[in-house]
Amino acid sequence: MGELPLRVFFHPQRGAFLSDEAINARVARYRGGADGGWRELKGVQVEQQKDGSFSTSGRLPAGFVWGDPSRQVFGLGGPALVYGPLEKRCRDCKVDFVFTAEEQRHWYETLGFFLDATAVRCSSCRTKRRRLEQARRAWELASKAVDSTAKSHVAVVEAGLTLLERGGQVKREKLMMHVARAEKLGANVRALRERLGAPLRR
């Protein structure tokens, strides 16, 4: 038998919390949302065992999933026994989105993110940011790999153009310098000049 039967409460901004009595509405105010947003997940119960582990019972509502503390990295706040849909506002585009329970479980139990980490951008903006970071890294690597070959200068220009297209910053004058160097070394740079919007040499 378990030592302490716990009820499961959920808040759409603050997440799931366990309590053996009515939830303190002020819990996790730093996560946002009104104090009155709490609701109990009826028919769901968690029991803490003498060895500190947990057992669960009941069927979670649609959109909720059980968590596995053995796969989580957490601090003094303890593990997440239940994940539920969290309502967020994207930091970049300001559009409301839902950080789903499945996404949370993937973050915390597959990717190994610290449990206090949370999504601050919608899926679309996260993808854009990831693509931007990939382009920035490719630009840095191409810049470091420049040598005396035309191919290396072309690679820098292509990486720089991709970075610009994805919202990054690169001085076009620097790209033009590499275009000129690649051309001098024998490369056909017509397409690169067109992408840069630079005049073609006749």
Image (tube, rainbow, N blue to C red):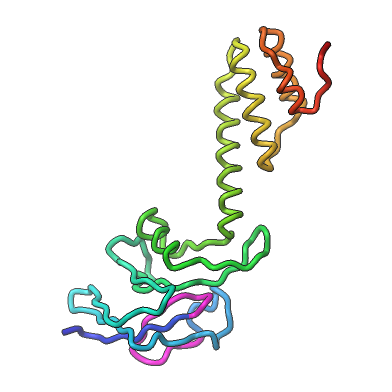
Quarter of the view holding residue 68: bottom left
Say if 133 sits above or below 10 in the image. Answer: above
The picture places residue 155, in percent across and down from the top left corner, at 60, 22
The picture places residue 142, in percent across and down from the top left corner, at 57, 25
Quadrant in which the N terminus is drawn: bottom left
At a point 59% along the width and 11% down the height, the residue shown is: 149
Say if 145 sits above or below 76 in the image. Answer: above
Q: Nearer the viewer, residue 123 or 129?
A: 123
The picture places residue 30, in percent across and down from the top left corner, at 55, 74
Residue 122 part of the magenta segment = no
Quarter of the view holding residue 65: bottom left
Give the mark count: 0
Residue 17 part of the magenta segment = yes
Quadrant in which the C terminus is drawn: top right
The picture places residue 55, in percent across and down from the top left corner, at 24, 77
At a point 36% along the width and 79% down the height, the residue shown is: 60
Asked whether, in this view, residue 67 is left or right of residue 32, the answer is left
Q: Residue furthest bottom?
A: 22
Q: Magenta segment range?
A: 11-25
At a point 40% along the width and 59% down the height, the residue shown is: 106
- SS majority, magenta: loop
At a point 29% along the width and 82% down the height, the residue shown is: 58
Q: Nearer the viewer, residue 102 or 108?
A: 102
